[in-house]
Amino acid sequence: MKTFYSIIKIAPNPTAGDSLAIGLLVRDQERVWLRFSDRKKKAAKSLLDNEAEVVDFAVTQLLKQKNHINKQLESPQQVLFQSNIDKSFNADYFNYLSRYCNGLLQFSPVSTLKDNILNQDKFDKLFQIFVDIIEPEEPIVENDTKRKRFLKRIETKLIERVKDQVHTNININQNILPSLFFNINIDCIGLNGVFTGAKAIPFDQTKQTIDTHVSHYITLINTLVTKYGKKNDNNKFFLIADEPVDTGGDLHNFWEILRKRDEFKLIHSEQAGTVAELIESSQAHTFLPVETVIDNK
């Protein structure tokens, strides 16, 4: 098959014909390449008001589909999947989307490339031409781990932005909430009419350990909203947890279950900045007694 690309756009006002490129999808013979610009996504969401969450949902679904297809293409039995993949993720499919997706998320008509096989460098160059510059990432040192990078992302995108505004990296215990029967660390929590808070949980632990952390977080949420009389649908609690790579495994299935919980919204660590934006825009502030708050920093 010929290598093709489609530019992914957000149209804040589809009837006006305006759009902002936020991502690039390329398909060659060996894999699907897909990347989004955090800077362009943020700019698009700032224009969407109540529809901003649609952007995050669309990006998550496309990345999930990309990972699923690439996993099939890398499988020793990939020949068995090739026919279905070619039918569902080919140039005709994206040309169809470009003609009939006239809502918020749009795709440009497919264009072909001379190179049949891409590499990361070629894809990055295309991305910078059609979408946005690629900011250099911090070098990953040899002893760095996936968990360290996960926590660093939370610190940079969320904690550093709101540490002077709301409670961050605190341990909430019975000194703060007498009805609480355990200690729990929470990454951030603020109040201004409603709660805005987040807890990050790395998914490199056992399911039982993660389940305990989640159960404690849900109990904390219920305790807070009861104590402060804030039982309403406007509270914004987030669980930050990256999607496990083992699609179909126990941890991935559990992650999928957590996505459907009503007590919080599950987001990727790359989206941690959206929590900071909510805290900043809502002017949330500290509310727990200062003398009882334990700062873990």
Image: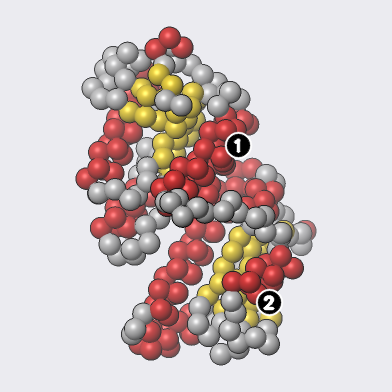
Residue corresponding to mark 1: 277
Percent coordinates x, y for residue 73 in the rendering = 42, 80
User: Does residue 103 appear to the left or right of 61 in the view shown?
Assistant: right
Q: Say which quarter of the image contains residue 211.
A: top left
Residue at horizontal 60 percent and vertical 79 percent from the top:
118
Residue at horizontal 46 percent and vertical 12 percent from the top:
290
Percent coordinates x, y for residue 237 in the rendering = 44, 35
Q: Secondary structure at mark 1?
A: helix
Q: Amino acid at mark 1?
A: Glu
Instruction: Please identify the quadrant where the N terminus is shown.
Output: bottom right
Q: Secondary structure at mark 2?
A: loop
Residue corresponding to mark 2: 109
Residue at horizontal 31 percent and vertical 20 percent from the top:
173
Q: Amino acid at mark 2?
A: Pro
For the residue carrying disc 1, how many other residues have a C-alpha within 10 Å: few (<14), some (14-19), or many (20+)? some
Percent coordinates x, y for residue 82 in the rendering = 42, 86
Q: Can residue 292 be seen?
A: yes
